[in-house]
Image (tube, rainbow, N blue to C red):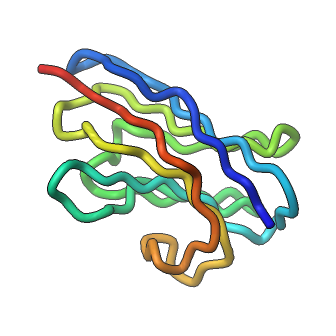
């Protein structure tokens, strides 16, 4: 059983930065992948970024590459998403996910999800 709690969302202007956090608790494994997904109004849930907890390899959606950075703090068991140069199209509910996955972009492979945190970017 893993619990994930996101924080850090908010309302910002286009071009601003924001950092999301996801604190993991309960039984976690170093072999987990952790990821950020988002869902905008009227759109499907989409992959944003992921990191393998052991080894730290990262993956990014093309839409955020170069603007967003995923990172982790092993001691705090916390995942972060640094979002720079935010655009209105980044507006969405952002979800933290964790689990044993084969392909990090597949949302359905993740076993655990946070409650989501709203990010709104105004023009």
The residue at 54%/58% (across/down) is 35
Q: Quadrant of residue 32?
A: bottom right
In the displayed structure, 112 sits above or below 117; it is below
The residue at 66%/71% (across/down) is 99
Which residue is the extreme one toward the left? 123
The residue at 87%/40% (across/down) is 75
Which image quarter is the N terminus in?
A: bottom right
Which residue is the extreme one toward the front? 115
Q: Quadrant of residue 22?
A: top right
The residue at 62%/73% (across/down) is 111
- The mark tally for this picture is 0
In the displayed structure, 69 sits above or below 44; it is above
Residue 28 image point, x, y percent: 83, 62
Horizontal side of 34 relative to 11 (left or right) equals: right
Which image quarter is the C terminus in?
A: top left
Horizontal side of 52 relative to 59 (left or right) equals: right
Q: Nearer the viewer, residue 104 or 4?
A: 4
Horizontal side of 18 relative to 35 (left or right) equals: left
Residue 108 image point, x, y percent: 47, 78
Residue 19 image point, x, y percent: 51, 27
């Amino acid at each position: 059983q893993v619990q994930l709690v996101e924080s850090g969302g908010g309302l910002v202007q286009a071009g601003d930065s924001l950092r999301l956090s996801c604190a993991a608790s309960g039984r976690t494994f170093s072999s987990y992948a952790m990821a950020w997904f988002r869902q905008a109004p009227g759109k499907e849930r989409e992959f944003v970024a992921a990191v393998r907890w052991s080894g730290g390899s990262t993956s990014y959606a093309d839409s955020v590459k170069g603007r967003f950075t995923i990172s982790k703090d092993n001691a705090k068991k916390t995942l972060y998403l640094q979002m720079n140069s935010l655009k209105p199209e980044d507006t969405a509910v952002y979800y933290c996910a964790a689990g044993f996955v084969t392909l990090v972009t597949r949302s359905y492979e993740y076993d655990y999800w946070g409650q989501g945190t709203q990010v709104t970017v105004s023009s």
